Image: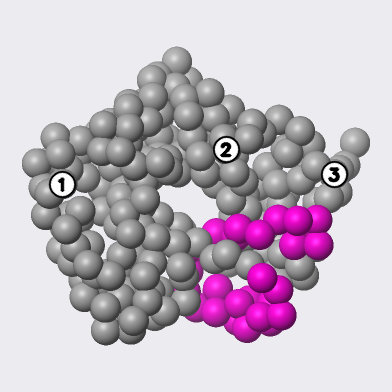
Amino acid sequence: MTTSLTDRWNLLHEELPVSARLLAVSKGHPASSIRELAQLGQRAFGESRLQDALPKQEALADLDLEWHFIGRLQSNKVRPVVKAFPVIHSVDSLPLAQRVSRIAEEEQVLPSVLLQVKFRPDPRKGGFDAESLLAIWPELSALPAMRIVGLMTMAPLDCPTSDRQALFAECRALADRLALPECSMGMSGDWRDAMAAGSTWLRLGSVLFGARPVSTPAMG
């Protein structure tokens, strides 16, 4: 039986503990769908491509929404991303963090940042490894004009189901060691494993919105 966007949102919220929040990954979906969810009470939305997100932000400027950038952050896009997104989930290196800090200071904004960490080998994804992050943590945590609030991770596509919860538990443990409250982990295919391991942000797209419209190009 086909379920509506409203039905899927309600069903998801029935499963979520108070400790985990739903980040509605709206990339590839129209502003009208975001508005429908906002009317239900959804406030946080995730986008990964700046050029697609900005028109939606403009169309929905009458709503009190919290925009999260979840895509790969390129150095040449840091300024517009910092200006448009109060939360960034994908800072994956010290030079990138330093650039975000400098530009945020110039723009007089204070973004919340999550550091992307890689707990398993994955040539398709960037990120700090746990040991190097611990080594440079004093330098990272001293950067001005941004608040490091947590860690973000993704399981490799070929990660066995039996290993996913362990991977997410490692991320939660590292965040706790650094006294960071947030863990952005878990997507449509593995969100229950991430939730069980202590995720605080579940990045859900297809399980919430359904398939992207056919006319929409694939996005990263």
* Residue 189 percent coordinates (x, y): 57, 34
Q: Quadrant of residue 190?
A: top right
Q: Secondary structure at mark 1?
A: helix
Crowding around mark 2 (Cα neighbors within 10 Å: few <14, some 14 to 19, many 20+) is many
Does residue 123 appear to the left or right of 168 in the view shown?
A: left
Q: Which residue is mark 2?
A: 20
Query: What amino acid type should be assigned to the residue bearing mark 3?
Result: Asp
* Residue 132 percent coordinates (x, y): 12, 41
Front residue (pair 129, 43) = 43
Query: What amino acid type should be assigned to the residue bearing mark 2?
Result: Ala
Q: Which residue is mark 3?
A: 7
Q: Secondary structure at mark 3?
A: helix
Magenta residues span 37-64
Q: Secondary structure at mark 2?
A: loop
Does residue 191 appear to the left or right of 212 in the view shown?
A: left
Query: What amino acid type should be assigned to the residue bearing mark 1?
Result: Trp
Does label 2 or label 1 sit earlier along the sequence?
A: 2
Does residue 100 appear to the left or right of 167 in the view shown?
A: left
Q: Is residue 28 magenta?
A: no
Does label 2 or label 3 sit earlier along the sequence?
A: 3
